[in-house]
Image (cartoon, coloured by chain):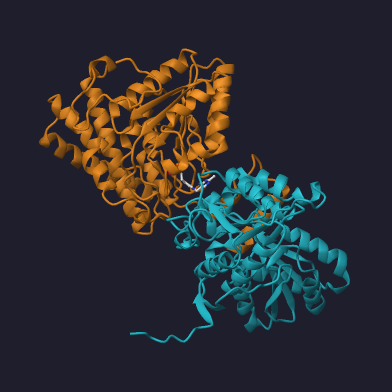
């Protein structure tokens, strides 16, 4: 007996499901999209992002590789130059480093060194970030290395809707993109996301919360912490604006200046250590371009300048207390 | 038995049922040695089982079981001496404990307590101890291989009488680290044993999908080194082959690759679901027909050295020792929050001094 199903336009999804849905939609639309990585075949990836993909698209397009990040990223570079759009999965971003050379020396520089003849439309997807009891090598936020490498784009979504749209934009982009997935919130929240492909543009930030007293600028898993801190300060009459950068390279200059001009106070929040960190760049940009708007110091909040700990993760990770202290520091200047 | 490289089948001293298939007397082991070896096997399994429970209780965040690989780990660590260096990986606690890591320290490591020689600074897959010449394993697969070769090069340069052993899995042989390490080891004739525990899986990836050579041992040929294939579930064979390679390294006759052919019983780690990739029946076959502990027990019985009564007494004894070790670990304090900044550099930098004040304010101490 045939049943008639009304076609739903959206699906309630976690970030893992959203990323998977982006992969399925793009692989269905574009036969040049392939994916490669460790355990991404029958195992479905250690976070199950690629679950079911090998059955749908076969072994030629869902490539379970030997344990070698050098091979994964290097092969992706070669595939991309040939005309495919590879999406490489690195199991944890902490394990990208055996393939770092291929990313920063090859993928990032291919377009420049061939005067535009060759380029690498590839994505390196990888879970990043702390708060999961992962210790020093399953928790890091190494965005600074990538952002400091001209030729690479760097993207980090903070919710399922953006994750799908940003990943599709990244796959369609003609430059190499490091796509950092905040594993702590992989399954934290469900959102209705459109079925079928849609884009969230690269290079555009989003206001996660409107406010008028202070601009809290962040990305990825820290957006949620920023929102929590904003709620905490609300009863005290402090109205926090949260800007979710979404793309770190190229970052959204206009959105940053708009919020800075509006509030005159800036707190920058990242998980990584502060010295040489990405938010130092944002601070410099604001100081160079918008000093006239500032009514207090630009304050950075981050992890401490140590390797990522295990047992003392709580003492390390930015928390509501650390963020609210920083906000008060700039407001009470 | 003459120990030869590049055999087609794994070197063994014991049949699967424990009966000797070679002359075990030539190993020069006494009855006491045999009994200690057996106790170590049983003890390692008991520690493993206990850790598994800690994870299930949510008291430990991560655990990679060694169950099934006890003979491989213990047999290869026993021929080492105090002056030798040992580089473990994420699944080598059996070897670390033979080198001298206490079970209480291992449990403290699982729980992130101060008794852990790494003081809770590392995901619990193995702490280091300087006094035992045992650096803490990295999480990054393969990183230890070139380091171990470097240590062996230094041992050679300094004319130390120590050698180095380095553990890694079959998956690690796909990383560049393995190939570079093999080459350096051979070029500098370093006193190193590169010990590959081939448990046939790297998380979900079977060996056939990892590499297209039939064995890992044969890869040594291409680097001008000897490669030995040993039955990793045969304690005496692992011991004999490792001792052979250790003697060779000590005599200045260079590095060796050992492939210890074994099987892991547990999932890759506490975060894995092995039902997604393991064929039905495979695990049962290994557990019931190839178990390294059962095999050695049957050997002891065949030599009239073991019976049910001794087994019962041993289990009681081991259970008590494990409980005592865990209790010691539990009695150890968790690290102070303020210590999170310690050990980043030899001395605090001005920036870290500043952060120390910030952290103190945040914690209200
Ligand atoms: C460089 C690197 N890539 C990926 C990982 C994730 N990972 C941890 S263990 C492992 C498999 C290791 O397999 P193998 O070397 O065979 O050792 P086994 O776990 O089987 O003992 C993987 C992929 C890692 N820790 N480091």
Q: Is residue A277 left or right of residue B106?
A: right
Decide: is A124 above or below B140.
below
In the picture, residue A303 is in which quadrant?
A: bottom right
Q: Is residue B29 left or right of residue B298?
A: right
Q: Is residue B163 left or right of residue A197?
A: left
Q: Residue furthest front?
A: A1
In the picture, residue B31 is in which quadrant?
A: top left
Give the residue at x 18% y 26%.
B19
**Dividing the image into 4 quarters, which one contains the C terminus of chain A?**
bottom right
Decide: is A190 above or below B89.
below
Q: Residue furthest top?
A: B251
Q: Position of residue B198 (x, y in %)?
A: 39, 37
Depth order, front residue of A76/A289: A76
Q: Position of residue A212 (x, y in %)?
A: 74, 81
Give the residue at x 82% y 50%.
A115
Depth order, front residue of B8/A83: A83
* Drawing shade for chain A: cyan
In the picture, residue B247 is in which quadrant?
A: top left
Is residue A242 visible in the rendered image? The answer is no
* Drawing shade for chain B: orange
Is residue B221 visible in the rendered image? The answer is yes
User: How many numbered discs?
Assistant: 0
Q: Position of residue A74 (x, y in %)?
A: 63, 45
Q: Residue furthest right?
A: A292
Q: Position of residue B147 (x, y in %)?
A: 56, 31
Give the residue at x 59% y 46%.
B342
**Dividing the image into 4 quarters, which one contains the N terminus of chain A?**
bottom left
């Amino acid at each position: 007996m045939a049943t008639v199903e009304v076609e739903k336009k959206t699906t309630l999804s976690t970030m893992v499901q959203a990323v998977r849905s982006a992969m399925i939609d793009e692989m269905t639309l574009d036969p040049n999209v392939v994916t490669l990585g460790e355990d991404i075949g029958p195992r479905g990836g250690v976070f199950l992002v690629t679950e079911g993909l090998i059955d749908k698209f076969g072994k030629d397009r869902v490539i379970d590789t030997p344990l070698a990040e050098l091979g994964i990223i290097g092969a992706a570079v070669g595939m991309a130059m040939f005309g495919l759009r590879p999406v490489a999965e690195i199991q944890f971003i902490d394990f990208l480093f055996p393939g770092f050379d291929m990313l920063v020396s090859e993928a990032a520089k291919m377009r420049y060194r061939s005067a535009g003849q060759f380029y690498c439309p590839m994505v390196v997807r990888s879970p990043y970030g702390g708060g999961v009891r992962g210790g020093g090598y399953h928790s890091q936020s190494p965005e600074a290395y990538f952002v400091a490498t001209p030729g690479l784009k760097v993207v980090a979504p903070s919710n399922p809707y953006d994750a799908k749209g940003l990943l599709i934009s990244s796959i369609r982009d003609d430059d190499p993109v490091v796509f950092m997935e905040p594993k702590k919130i992989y399954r934290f929240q469900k959102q209705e996301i459109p079925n079928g492909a849609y884009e969230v543009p690269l290079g555009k930030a989003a206001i996660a919360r409107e406010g008028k007293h202070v601009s809290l600028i962040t990305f990825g898993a820290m957006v949620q912490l920023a929102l929590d801190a904003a709620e905490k300060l609300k009863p005290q009459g402090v109205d926090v604006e949260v800007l979710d950068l979404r793309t770190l390279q190229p970052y959204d200059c206009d959105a940053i200046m708009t919020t800075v001009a509006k509030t005159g106070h800036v707190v920058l929040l990242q998980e990584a250590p502060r010295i040489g960190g990405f938010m130092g760049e944002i601070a410099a940009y604001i100081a160079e371009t918008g000093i006239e708007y500032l009514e207090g110091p630009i304050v950075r909040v981050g992890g401490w300048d140590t390797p990522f700990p295990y047992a003392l993760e709580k003492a390390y990770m930015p928390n509501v207390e650390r963020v609210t202290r920083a906000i008060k520091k700039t407001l009470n200047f | 038995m003459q120990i030869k490289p590049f055999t087609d089948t794994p070197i063994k001293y014991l049949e699967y049922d424990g009966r000797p298939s070679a002359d075990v007397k030539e190993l020069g082991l006494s009855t006491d040695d045999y009994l200690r070896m057996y106790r170590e096997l049983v003890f390692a399994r008991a520690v493993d089982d206990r850790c598994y429970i800690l994870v299930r209780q949510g008291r430990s965040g991560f655990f990679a079981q060694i169950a099934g690989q006890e003979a491989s780990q213990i047999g290869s660590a026993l021929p080492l001496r105090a002056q030798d260096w040992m580089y473990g990986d994420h699944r080598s606690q059996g070897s670390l404990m033979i080198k001298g890591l206490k079970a209480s320290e291992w449990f403290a490591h699982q729980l992130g307590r101060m008794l852990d020689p790494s003081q809770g600074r590392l995901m619990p897959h193995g702490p280091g101890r300087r006094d035992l010449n045992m650096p803490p394993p990295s999480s990054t697969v393969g990183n230890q291989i070139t380091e171990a070769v470097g240590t062996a090069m230094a041992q050679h340069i300094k004319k130390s009488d120590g050698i180095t052993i380095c553990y890694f899995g079959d998956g690690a042989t796909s990383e560049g680290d393995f190939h570079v390490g093999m080459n350096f080891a051979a070029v500098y004739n370093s006193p190193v044993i590169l010990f590959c525990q081939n448990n046939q899986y790297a998380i979900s990836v079977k060996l056939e999908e990892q590499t297209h050579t039939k064995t890992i041992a044969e890869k040594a040929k291409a680097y001008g080194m000897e490669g030995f294939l040993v039955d990793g579930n045969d304690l005496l064979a692992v011991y004999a082959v490792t001792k052979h390679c250790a003697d060779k390294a000590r005599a200045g006759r260079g590095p060796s690759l050992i492939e210890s052919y074994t099987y892991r019983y547990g999932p890759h780690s506490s975060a894995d679901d092995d039902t997604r990739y393991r064929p039905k029946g495979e695990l049962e076959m290994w557990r019931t027909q190839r178990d390294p502990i059962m095999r050695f027990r049957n050997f002891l019985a065949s030599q009239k050295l073991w019976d049910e009564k001794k087994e019962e007494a041993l289990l009681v004894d081991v259970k008590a020792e494990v409980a005592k070790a865990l209790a010691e670990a539990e009695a150890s304090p968790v690290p102070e929050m303020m210590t999170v900044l310690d050990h980043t550099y030899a001395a605090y930098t001005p920036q870290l001094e500043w952060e120390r004040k910030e952290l103190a304010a945040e914690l209200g101490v």
